[in-house]
Image: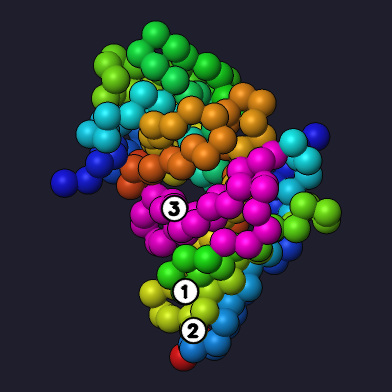
Amino acid sequence: DADVTQTPRNRITKTGKRIMLECSQTKGHDRMYWYRQDPGLGLRLIYYSFDVKDINKGEISDGYSVSRQAQAKFSLSLESAIPNQTALYFCATSGQQGPGETQYFGPGTRLLVL
Amino acid sequence: GESVGLHLPTLSVQEGDNSIINCAYSNSASDYFIWYKQESGKGPQFIIDIRSNMDKRQGQRVTVLLNKTVKHLSLQIAATQPGDSAVYFCAENGNRDDKIIFGKGTRLHILP
C-alpha cells in the first residue's frame, strides 16, 4: 500500500462549488504539506502543518483552507472554486526537522474547475 | 528574492549517454539541496540530496554536484535509460523556515 494517498485522484467541479481534497499517510510523519503544480511553474506551497495543532500559510494560500484532523490526515478545501484553481494538487509528508527534510509525495489529484 | 531555477526546460539525451541537468539557486543561506524525479501521472520522488558542506555526492547511477561559489547544482545520470524519462526538479531548504523551495523542472527525453 502507498504511504501517502490522496482522494479523489481526479475531480471536475463548477465555479463556485466547495470541494475538499483529502490526504492520508501511514508514514507516521508529523509534517504535512499541500502543493499545487501548474505547467511551467513547478510546485508551489499552499499550506503546511508541522503537527496537529500547527497550520501555516504557504506561498499561495488565498482561496484555500486546510484542516489537520489527525497526525495522519490533512485536507485541503476550496471554499468557492474558480477556473484558475485548475491544477494538479500534491500532498507531501516529512518526518525530519530542519535541514535534511526529505518530502514524500502522494500521487496527486487532478482538479478541473469549469 | 529567493529563487530556484533550471537552465533548460527540456533535455534530450541518447539512450546510454550520460545526462546532466543543471539548476541555479539564489539563496546563499540554503544548506540542503534535493533532486526529485517526477514521472508522468505520479508525484515527485526523491532521488538524491546533498548538504552544503559537501560538493559531491553519489548514488546509484546518479551524482549531484554542488558549487556554492556560483550557486549551481547539477544532477548527473550515468548511462541514461528509457526509465529515466521524467521531469527533474531541484529544490532547496533555506534553513530559515524549514520549507522547501522547488525549481520549475527540466524534462528529460530519452532518444532511442
Q: Is residue A109 left or right of residue A102?
A: left
Locate residue B13 relative to residue B69 in the image: left or right. left
Question: Is B53 covered by the magenta stretch?
Answer: yes
Residue type pointed to by label 1: Arg
Secondary structure of residue under mark 3: strand
Q: Residue at x 73, y 63 (%)?
A: B7
Element under disc 2: loop
Q: Are marks 2 and 1 in contact (CB under 8 Å)?
A: yes
Q: Which residues are magenta?
A: B30-57
Residue highlighted by disc 3? B46
Q: Residue at 58%, 52% (x, y): give it.
A: B50
Q: Position of residue B96 (x, y in %)?
A: 66, 26
Label 2 to label 1, Cα distance in Å? 7 Å
Q: Residue furthest front?
A: B53
Report which residue position mark 2 lands on.
B79
**Image quarter for residue A17?**
top left
Q: CA distance from mark 3 to mark 1?
A: 14 Å
Whichever of callouts 2 and 1 sits on the residue coming sooner in the sequence is 1
Which image quarter holds the N terminus of chain B?
Answer: top right
Magenta stretch containing residue B34, yes or no? yes
Query: Can residue A94 be seen?
Result: yes
Tell me the crowding category of disc 2: few under 14, some 14 to 19, or many 20 or more residues within 10 angstroms, Cα based.
Answer: some
Of residue B1 and residue A84, the one placed in the foreground of this image is B1
* Chain of the residue that carries numbered disc 1 in the rendered image: B
Identify the residue position indicated by label 1 in the image.
B61
